[in-house]
Amino acid sequence: MILVVGGAGYVGSHLVKELVEKEKVVVLDNLSTGFKQLVDSNAIFVQGDLGDRRVLDDIFNTYPIKAVMHFAANSLVGESVTDPYKYYQNNVAATLTLLKAMVDHNVKNFIFSSTAATYGVPNVDLIDEKQPNNPINPYGKTKLMVEQILEDFATAYDLHYIVLRYFNVAGAHESSTIGESHDPETHLIPIILQHLLGEREKISVFGTDYDTPDGTCIRDYIHATDLANAHILALDALLEEEKETEVYNLGNGNGFSVKEVIETCESVTGIKANIEYGDRRQGDPAKLVASSEKIKRELGWEPKFNLNQIIESAWKWHSSQNIS
Ligand code: UDP
């Protein structure tokens, strides 16, 4: 059985949908940002906190867990700057409790959701895993801290782990039963689509004076299902003992500016956006684009969705939601 911590969240629920096809799954989620209805009905759901040792002991004593996949974190760059305590507490301290419980219960395989924010402001067009880590916001720092904890746990306790550094996850499952939903929403693509559905008056573009061709930030958008499939490959590599400790980037390798993302949303939906150009948001690097060559080469991963398809799937899901 596999324990998926944070399986009721946006990314975690996409992973659970793929994973239940081949494994028995227990989801632990405190529903602080996730939604129970996103959890596939074939998974066992436990509502609780990953920092709560009693809940973890119960799960490890009840189910034969052979690996843990950890998606439960706060992940908003801006919020991490204004409320760092929340980030160090939830992302680092609670994760340490989870890792210690794993060690005590002799569970040796761990997949960790990390982020491109560990790289800070890299000076290269395509970021590979050899780029130095130099996070510029508390969110990126918390993820890097956990990566460092993992290195030491591997040495001391023989923990096997794979770290996946996500670039910008977007899109919805092909069934349109699950999609990206945060409250409040801060992510670019859902905000644009909510606006185009008439749920927001306008879109604010955060900064037009970045050192990029059109002055707006460039990001690498990857579909949640492509990301989920990478997790399955990583899990197989750990369980089949092909890998012990690895770090992989996960992105499409193509960068799109905020303006380009808005234009693509306009062309997919056929609706014109009302755009307001504003100041920079704290903590945003100008450009983050992945080289994912390592995971392609070593695990045979191949992303299937381009930006257009990502936005089409997100639009289908958003349009099917009855948000007033
Ligand atoms: N962004 C924006 N307006 C918004 C939300 C986001 O201009 O309403 C920009 C943001 O500054 C960043 C990019 O869109 O450059 C992607 O932001 P998002 O929050 O989706 O993901 P992040 O890169 O922070 O993980």
Image (cartoon, rainbow, N blue to C red):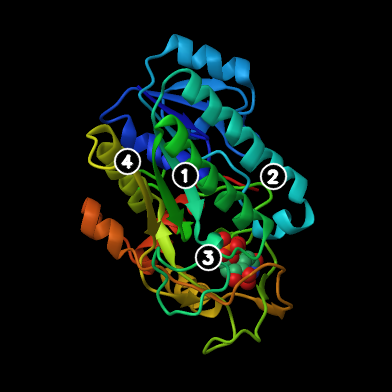
Q: Residue furthest bottom?
A: 213
Amino acid under disc 3: Tyr
Locate residue 188, reporting x and y percent.
Answer: 57, 64
Q: CA distance from mark 3 to mark 1?
A: 17 Å
Tell me the SS state at disc 2.
Answer: helix
Picture quarter containing residue 306?
bottom left
Within 10 Å of the Cα at label 1, are there few (<14), some (14-19), or many (20+) other Cα atoms? some
Quick check: marks 4 and 2 in contact, CB under 8 Å?
A: no
Q: Earlier in the sequence, mark 4 or mark 3?
A: 3
For the residues carrying marks 2 and 1, which lies nearer the camera in this image? 1
Q: Residue at x 40, y 68 (%)?
A: 290
Tell me the SS state at disc 4.
Answer: loop
Q: Earlier in the sequence, mark 1 or mark 4?
A: 1
List the residue tagged with mark 1: 151
Locate residue 77, reporting x and y percent.
Answer: 65, 59
Q: CA distance from mark 4 to mark 2?
A: 27 Å
List the residue tagged with mark 4: 244
Looking at the image, how many numbered discs can be counted on the residues? 4
Within 10 Å of the Cα at label 4, are there few (<14), some (14-19), or many (20+) other Cα atoms? some
Within 10 Å of the Cα at label 2, are there few (<14), some (14-19), or many (20+) other Cα atoms? many
For the residues carrying marks 3 and 1, which lies nearer the camera in this image? 1
Q: Nearer the viewer, residue 111 or 228?
A: 111
Quick check: marks 3 and 2 in contact, CB under 8 Å?
A: no
Q: CA distance from mark 4 to mark 3?
A: 23 Å
Q: Residue at x 53, y 20 (%)?
A: 46
Name the disc covering residue 294, or none: none
> Ligand 1 sits in which quadrant?
bottom right
Q: Is residue 50 visible?
A: yes
List the residue tagged with mark 3: 119
Picture quarter containing residue 216?
bottom right
Amino acid under disc 1: Glu
